[in-house]
Amino acid sequence: MCVERGWLSTGGSLMHDGARKKIAVLMGGRSSEREVSLVSGSAVARAIDQTRYHVIPVHITQRGSWERMESLYDQDHLIRTFHDALKPTRLPFIPYSDLRGAIEILETTDIVFPVLHGPYGEDGTIQGFLETAGMPYVGGGVLFHSVCMDKPLLKSLLMHEGIPTPRFVCIREAEWHSDSVRQLEMIQSSLTLPVFVKPAALGSSVGISKVTESNGLREAIIHAFQFGNRVIVEQGIEGREIECSVMGNEDPVVSTVFGEIKACNEFYDYEAKYVKDSTLIIPAPDMDEVTMERIRMMAAKAFKIAGGAGYARIDFLLGSEGPMLNEINTIPGFTEISMFPRLFMAEGMTFGDIVNRLIELGLARFRNQIQTREKI
């Protein structure tokens, strides 16, 4: 018999040891999306069933230290920190993070719920750390997060698998500085205005610009490079922004209800998402069943080929050429007003039901990993 974090494994089956499990909810982090993470993580921590779990809210600082939290955040925090969140910043290389707090917390924790948006949270790095520690956690594994966080890589995979996605050009910083004129010519020969210029591996619409005139392209690229060393330029699609939610492991379930974004700004940028009153229409109106079923099939296929587990919000653009998959968000915004939970809530689940179901999926995934190892 072997003991795995309070779960007893014997003969290929697992038995709960009866104690209330300790779950660490990770929030904050080093990325420019840390303020959103603090609000999402706080909402998750409040929703966990405390008759089954002892909740340990954990703040990961910008230096990478882990600290237990005494109080949680609310939605107003995003309004208070709006201008700081949009300041251009490169993630500093930290040769050593003080992990004494992390070790102390993990030694007394049974499962981790990472609610960390952006780099060092949504890109597979925290998942790799937890895998190395042998710690169960909520959500997909290293591959799923790293592939979906990297926009050019995900889009290349989607194209290879025959899943429609907007055309794009990826620019590396060294190539840009070497010959920016050539890079601009390549973009203008491959794409037509309008286009969207984005950091290649960031979320929450940070660093994104919509370019409608050619003389604005250079400035938008320079702005995006302030957040990373690769930039993606995507073909703008005239149409609707439709989103669905996915939950599950080997057999993922796509929400039957879809949502539509009506941005109050020119596009759904950080301010429109978290500060102003953009409209989230649930259910998305005037959707024919054929298109909805096509979106569900595309979402389920993309989730599986990217190595998905746990949950995701998948964003589509619905234009004259039909639905195109735009992004897979592996740790989407997670408050009661966020799109991911609201779509399942529209089907009858409560916010708490969703959070606790995701914990069950994380534990189930860990049990399957143990059983696979025991068979080897």
Image (cartoon, grey):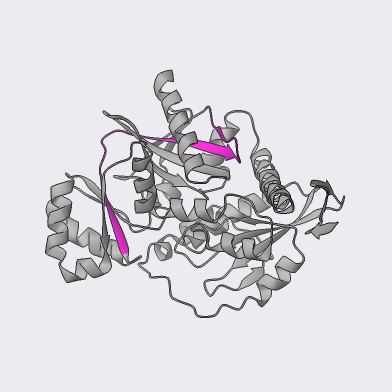
The single residue placed furthest to the top in the displayed view is 289
Q: Nearer the viewer, residue 198 or 140?
A: 140
Asked if residue 213 can be seen in this view, the reply is no
Which residue is at a point 44% across and 63% down the rendered structure image? 32
Which residue is at a point 47% across and 29% down the rendered structure image? 296
Instruction: Judge whether 368 appears above or below 217 on screen.
Output: above
In the image, taking residue 349 as reference, residue 337 lies left or right, namely left
Q: Position of residue 268 (x, y in %)?
A: 36, 45
**Quadrant position of residue 177:** bottom left
Instruction: Judge whether 61 appears above or below 255 on screen.
Output: below
Q: Is residue 70 magenta?
A: no
Q: Nearer the viewer, residue 156 or 82?
A: 156
Q: Position of residue 306 (x, y in %)?
A: 48, 46
Q: Position of residue 35 (x, y in %)?
A: 50, 60
Asked if residue 117 can be seen in this view, the reply is yes
Instruction: Judge whether 72 appears above or below 284 on screen.
Output: below
Quarter the N terminus occupies: bottom right
Q: Nearer the viewer, residue 180 or 115?
A: 180
In the image, taking residue 63 as reference, residue 267 lies left or right, namely left
Instruction: Judge whether 100 appears above or below 253 on screen.
Output: below
Which residue is at a point 20% across and 45% down the rendered structure image? 194
Q: Position of residue 73 (x, y in %)?
A: 60, 58
**How many numbered circles are shown?**
0
Q: Nearer the viewer, residue 169 or 206?
A: 169
What residue range appears in magenta?
230-256
Provide the major secondary structure of the magenta segment.
strand
In the image, taking residue 184 as reference, residue 164 lies left or right, namely right
In the image, taking residue 149 as reference, residue 341 lies left or right, namely right
Which residue is at a point 56% across and 72% down the rendered structure image? 64
